Image: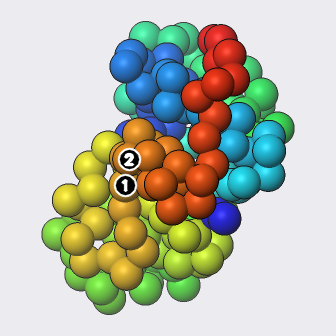
Amino acid sequence: MRLLLDTNVLIDYYSRREPYVQDWLTLLVAQDFKDVELWASAKSFTDVFYVTQKAVGSMRLQQMFLESLKFLHVCSIGLADIQGAAQLAWDDFEDCLIDVAARKVKAAFIITRDASGFSQSKIPALSAHDFIAWQDAEKGLSYESLSLGS
């Protein structure tokens, strides 16, 4: 099952924001078990860099990007994607591009901290925490017995 990670979720990961780190670790375990594939839009990396580079440091953040490419799949954004998003004319163009990327990779869910931004999306948007709870309830997949250290 493919999950497209919204930019705000990536910011949580790269800046190690609490209380979201534990949910991130759970998503990584789910991917290790091949229960999910974690995807991100290539466009999100520039936004993440802009928001977090002062706190994390430019060189460290770029190293973190390289390390994360071992487990993140990246969806490119091209001319047709930008045109398609602009034609949809959402109020928030960034969220619309995330939706376009999610459709492009055939994601089952968009993982975000702002599900309301995706009210026009045909792909369900959930927080990482809510997705983990859904996965447990609907699929019987739980990772809580595993020791998840940072």
Residue 26, horizontal then vertical, whole percent: 60, 33
Picture residue at 43% right of the left edge, 84% below the top:
83
Q: Which mark is residue 144?
A: none
Give the position of the N terminus as an image quadrant: bottom right
Q: CA distance from mark 2 to mark 1?
A: 6 Å
Picture residue at 65% right of the left edge, 12% below the top:
149
| Neighbourhood count class around disc 2 (C-alpha, 10 Å): few under 14, some 14–19, many 20 upward | some
Residue 121, horizontal then vertical, whole percent: 33, 76
Residue under circle 1?
126
58 or 138, which lies in front? 138
Proximity of marks 2 and 1: CB atoms separated by less than 8 Å: yes
Give the number of callouts.
2
122 or 90, which lies in front? 122
Q: Secondary structure at mark 1?
A: strand
- The answer to whether residue 87 is above or below residue 63 is below
- The answer to whether residue 42 is above or below residue 93 is above
Residue 92, horizontal then vertical, whole percent: 23, 63
- The answer to whether residue 143 is above or below residue 36 is above
Say whether residue 39 is left or right of residue 127. Answer: right
Confirm whether residue 113 shows in the render: yes
130 or 127, which lies in front? 130
Q: What amino acid does circle 1 point to?
A: Leu
Q: What amino acid does circle 2 point to?
A: Asp
Q: Secondary structure at mark 2?
A: helix
Q: Which mark is residue 130?
A: 2
| Neighbourhood count class around disc 1 (C-alpha, 10 Å): few under 14, some 14–19, many 20 upward | some
Give the position of the C terminus as an image quadrant: top right
Say whether residue 128 is left or right of residue 102. Answer: left
Picture residue at 37% right of the left edge, 62% below the top:
125
Residue 4, horizontal then vertical, whole percent: 54, 58
Residue 57 image-quadrant placement: top right
